[in-house]
Image (cartoon, grey):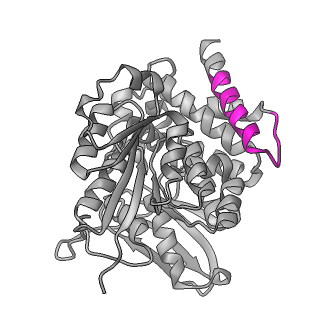
Amino acid sequence: MTAPIRNVAILGSTGSIGQSTLEVISAAAGRFRVLGLSAHRRLGRLCEQAAAFRVPTVVATDRQHAERFDWSRLPAEATALTGAEGIETLVASPDVEMVVAAIVGAAGLAGTWAALEAGKDVALANKETLVMAGPLVMALAARKDAKILPVDSEHSAVFQALRSGRADEVKRIILTASGGPFLRKTTAEIARVSVAQALAHPTWEMGPKITVDSATMMNKALEVIEARWLFDIPPDQIGVVVHPQSIVHSMVEFIDGSVVAQLSPPDMKLPIQHALTYPDRWEGPAAKLDFTQSMNLQFEPVDEDRFPAIPLGFEVARAGGTSGAVLNAANEAAVECFLQGQIGFHKIVPACRAVLEHHDFDESPTLQRLVKLDAWARGEITRWVCA
């Protein structure tokens, strides 16, 4: 039997995940239909994508930029919407079946929330959504009977490995980390890191914010928090191990001692496709492992003295409440300060800890409270940097 065509919308289509998603769809021989795309300011690229995939609706989330943009490049049959209301209109369309949430950072929460509110399955590439509001988001998905399918390579790997046993048979999940470009650097060398060095990741090609997070290993700290809510597993049953080759994307250890791992080359098209086609598997464009060639798989513990983001992430995963939203916002602001040359690389994590320790903790926050704390934490980083 021929599989039915799946109608998707991609939020953040001009970023690296969005573009890889379109590559997967392009290779799928007409088994997907793209009904909507969104971008913030790369509106020229957005118009090109709309033309290439005959997309009926696009959304420009930056209203002011959209007002100044020459929309003549947008196909005549396409409609352009703007702002958060445009995202809500797109994801609520009765024809959209799945939403790929690929907007980077806290900005991605609103679109994911709107998609789940509309009862749509979400292919989640935005880890910040669960870091900020994990319990609220998972509860909303349950109420609306909507699936959240992970796109992060680590969480996709865990998601796949968990199918090897029952929930009560899981001893722990183990997230792998490449270690980034500074795995072998001393603390003194890390203190002198430049922006260019931080953006030179050894195995993955990502946007600047995510690349810096990989260098500080804050990305892994955020993934610990995400995993805690996505898989409903206590933080003490989550581990992190350094694996420089980025071939084993994560593992699940079962109570009998068996460890099930998911392996593939570092190519985001595989976890993207798995989320889009679940529960089926299709041929796809992702790179494949070549077992005719020799390879080494290396694992080592995290040096928490050189990468203090990791213990900070576990602290936040245990605390819950407002901690995740504050950590995420502080990190986004601190990374931006680093990219602008305002603080040193080694000050990013201490700045996050300082803001976290001084916030007004709430164990059971509302979504509105989390949004306010997001803005507060960013302001605190600015004051910390300028002090």
Quadrant of the image containing the C terminus: top right
Q: Nearer the viewer, residue 122 or 213?
A: 122
* Residue 318 location (% of width, % of height): 74, 54
Magenta region, residue range:
360-381
Quarter where residue 340 is shown: top left
Total numbered badges shown on the rendered structure: 0
Residue 221 makes an appearance in the image: no
108 is higher (above) or lower (below) than 272: above
40 is higher (above) or lower (below) than 10: above
* Residue 206 location (% of width, % of height): 35, 44
Q: Is residue 45 magenta?
A: no
For the view shown, which residue lies furthest in the front direction? 77
Quarter where residue 286 is shown: bottom left
Horizontal side, residue 96 vs residue 366: left or right? left
Horizontal side, residue 259 vs residue 366: left or right? left
Horizontal side, residue 42 vs residue 188: left or right? left
Who's the residue at 27% across and 32% down the image? Answer: 44
* Residue 314 location (% of width, % of height): 66, 52
Q: Main secondary structure of the magenta part?
A: helix
* Residue 74 location (% of width, % of height): 27, 36
161 is higher (above) or lower (below) than 366: below
Quadrant of the image containing the N terminus: bottom left
Horizontal side, residue 225 vs residue 278: left or right? right
For the view shown, which residue lies furthest in the left direction? 292
Residue 278 makes an appearance in the image: yes
Q: Nearer the viewer, residue 312 or 35?
A: 35
Q: Nearer the viewer, residue 156 or 236?
A: 156
Who's the residue at 62% across and 49% down the image? Answer: 131
Who's the residue at 35% across and 67% down the image? Answer: 297
Q: Is residue 365 magenta?
A: yes
